[in-house]
Amino acid sequence: MEFKIGHRVRMQRTDNYGVVTAILPGGLVEVRLDAGKGELPLPADILEKVEDQAAKEGKRPRLKKESAPPQKAAAPPKAQSPPPAKEDERNRGVRLAFDPMTDNEANPVAYEVYLLNGTPHKIIYELKMMTHGDRRWSKSGTLEGYGKKRLDAVEYRWLNEKLNCELDVRTILVGGTGPRNFQRINLKGQQFFSKLQDVPELYRDAHLYMVFPTLSATPSAPAAAPNVPSLKAITQVAVQQKFREKQAKAQANKRKVETNLSEKLAFEDSIDLHIDKLVEDPEKIARHEVLPLQLKHYDEYMDQALRMGVDRVFIIHGVGNGVLKRAIHSRLHHYPFVRNFVNEHHPKYGYGATEVIFD
């Protein structure tokens, strides 16, 4: 199907609507999505013009009424299988979601990577992100059943640099782990953009990859040791780290009464996320690195605020509806122990800060 600039189109998989803004090479069409979701390059074969869809719906043939055939003796009812358990309805497998991060013009600059565990099993994982065969970053740890974890960001330009990832997963069982699940995924531009769909765990659209539809909970013999650290070794490190953290927490609790009050009094009730307030030389920070760096400082500050038990804080992001403010508000919707947050006029910050109120 041929599209022209200005055509109104619908995405067949997600039922999102938008307007064509550019015709790109390789069978791609740039579409500005409704509701300010930004502009995305999408494969033409997943789009249809809105007027074509309406025409199809208007030409549906009507079925003619026919005389009812003579009734036969009712057959005995067949035994029906019981409905699946409610837990099975939640099983969506292990998936990777790439959540778009946009600039002030609503163009994607990066994608936050989420690991979604849609199984009832606690898992241990390792994810490597690579371009041209070189590792960009690697994350490992554990994730509870039906849990999600934000790992790191993938820059938009990496899609043109032979981007791929490797996911290694095992279920955690009593006395050991389940069999190894390994998958290598090549993240190619056209295929990547076609996977935009609603992700219930994120409450918004993201590029979604199903990696492991199911996981086995049966213990198995350990696989041959690979050239890289095995999941067994990662498990041992995670267990040891958990033990050390538990010991450190026990020691910290002994002096908690003495230190909490002084730390709480010294804690700043605001953080300025303008890049010139975070680094000494803002000119050395590349444009695509600014937002991830700001969000890193934001996450660290919020974690510290929760540990201090403060009542409220102010996040200074600047006036207007910029990408930083939208990213912060998106996080606050899912942040634990946040009772409310408002971006109202403040005598000190004007409209350039969001007030966060904790439970």
Image: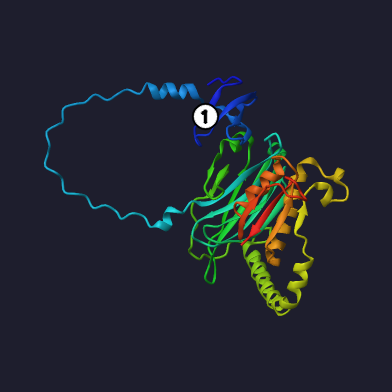
Q: Name the residue under label 1.
A: 10
Q: Position of residue 250 (x, y in %)?
A: 68, 77
Residue at 55% x, 57% y is 147
What residue appears at the point 77 percent right and 69 percent down from the top-left corner? 263
Q: What element carries label 1?
A: strand
Tell me which corner region of the image, top left, top right, bottom left or bottom right, holds residue 138: bottom right
Outermost front residue: 347
Specify the farthest residue to the right.
Answer: 281
Q: In which quarter of the image is the C terminus?
A: bottom right
Which residue is found at the position 71% from the left and 62% from the top?
A: 305
Please tell me how crowded label 1 is: few (under 14), some (14-19), or many (20+) other residues with Cα within 10 Å: many
Closer to the camera in the image, 314 or 291: 314
In the rendered view, would you say 297 is above or below 252? above
Q: Where is residue 215 in the image (x, y as percent from the top left)?
A: 50, 57
**In front of the other: 190 or 325:** 325
- Residue name at image x 63 percent, y 41 percent: 187
Q: Name the image quarter holding residue 176.
A: bottom right
Residue 154 image offset from top left, x and y in percent: 69, 45
Residue 165: percent from left, percent from top: 65, 47
| Amino acid beneath label 1 | Arg
235 sits left or right of 262 in the view: left
Left or right: residue 211 versus residue 344 is left
